[in-house]
Image (spheres, rainbow, N blue to C red):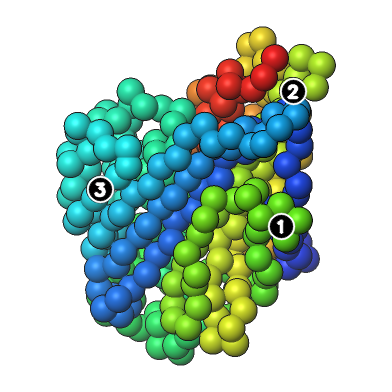
Amino acid sequence: MNAPQQFPFARQSAGPAPLRRPGSIRRTTSIDSDWPDGLGQPWRMTGRARDLLTPAAGDAVALAAADFRIRTSPMREIMEIAATPDHPRLHEMVGVRAGGASRHALAATLGDIRGTPIFQLLDDFAGASLVAGWNWSRWTDDWQKRMAGNSQQSTAGKKGRMVNICTGFTEGASSLSDDGSVDHANQSSTEVGPLVNPDDPVGWHEMAEQQGRPMARRARRIDIWRDEGVLKVDAGFQDSGPNPQGTRTAIHEYRVYAEIDEADDTLLSLQVLPLILPFRECPGASIKASRMVGEPVHGFRQSVLDTLIGTVGCTHLNDVLRAFADVPTLARMLPK
């Protein structure tokens, strides 16, 4: 068997968000996870989002905002849910388990609000809940045993067996133990600073303070602007949480640049920077992501999953690219 290609560990954050450009729209989202009753118990997820227009002149204008409150089981099933703005069918998401099931349920029940901040937040529930428990590794040595004892570990991969579910877990990778589970001894993470740029404090929506206990945050930023008939996109993504030293540790971070033909929504170019990733095989997904060039971005929520499947993709990079499906909707709010 040939071992998958390895790369140097990705351990360099992009730092705070760039300054907003005049004539641009920025969408920011965050999903915070907190375990008031401890690991292995139901936990709280709080999502926030905002679309912010920065005109060529004058003050920034908030175009839309959204939030959700979800109580999820250790098996990542939605036990309680509330959102602003509300939706008459939102209650139908109760009992749905994160992953493909939650994405299918979301499309079936709330498909009429695709492109909105609240749809993006709810779509991100699957990925955010998958990785959130990792932050406990910063706080306790027996976190894996406690997760396994409450069956939470079996929600990832095929009952905890991760072989070939993504580029980083290709068969033979350094990320895998002999039984196909994750080998956390070979896992890397990186200390990171704030996402908010001190020279642009309104560049992010307000986020709660996280400190002093195990918590997690999935944060996403998408900047969009026009340049001679082409839509330019600069996106950032990070999974992080506080550590006992009083700073923050990240397990995933990507920066993605793209150009999109505004006339037909076709992806013209794509550059993916793997900044922080847990295993040496993970950066390989950034190379394979170029297969999406030439595809219409409005269909990315499904076409990314169809194209960058299994060992061709990265679960978290796929989520970054899937969010590009909302670029055409946001672009329509750009000033001419």
Is 123 placed above or below 98 here? above
Which label's residue is closer to the chain start, 1 or 2?
Answer: 1
Q: Is residue 313 left or right of residue 110?
A: right
Gap in angstroms between the C-alphas marked 1 and 2: 23 Å
Q: Are marks 1 and 2 in contact (CB under 8 Å)?
A: no
Q: Nearer the viewer, mark 1 or mark 2?
A: 1
Residue highlighted by disc 1 = 197
Q: Measuring from the top left, give residue 182's x and y in whole percent.
A: 49, 70
| Left or right, residue 296 beside residue 276 | left
Marks 2 & 3, CB-CB < 8 Å contact: no
Q: CA distance from mark 1 to mark 3?
A: 30 Å
Image spot of residue 289 (x, y percent): 66, 39
- Measuring from the top left, give residue 91's x and y in whole percent: 18, 41
Q: Which residue is mark 2?
A: 226
Secondary structure found at label 3: strand
Q: Residues within 10 Å of mark 3 (few under 14, many from 20)?
A: some
Q: Please name the amino acid that badge 3 sits on.
A: Ala
Question: Along the polypeptide, which appears first: circle 2 or circle 3?
Answer: 3
| Residue 3 sits in quarter | bottom right
The residue shown at (29%, 55%) is 70
Please state which amino acid type lies under the numbered disc 2: Arg
Quadrant for the C terminus, please.
top right
**Mark 2 and mark 3: Cα distance apart in space:** 35 Å
Residue 43 visible here: yes
Q: Which mark is residue 82?
A: 3
Q: Secondary structure at mark 1?
A: loop
Number of residues whose C-alpha sits closer than 10 Å to that of mark 1, classed few (under 14), some (14–19) or many (20 or more): some
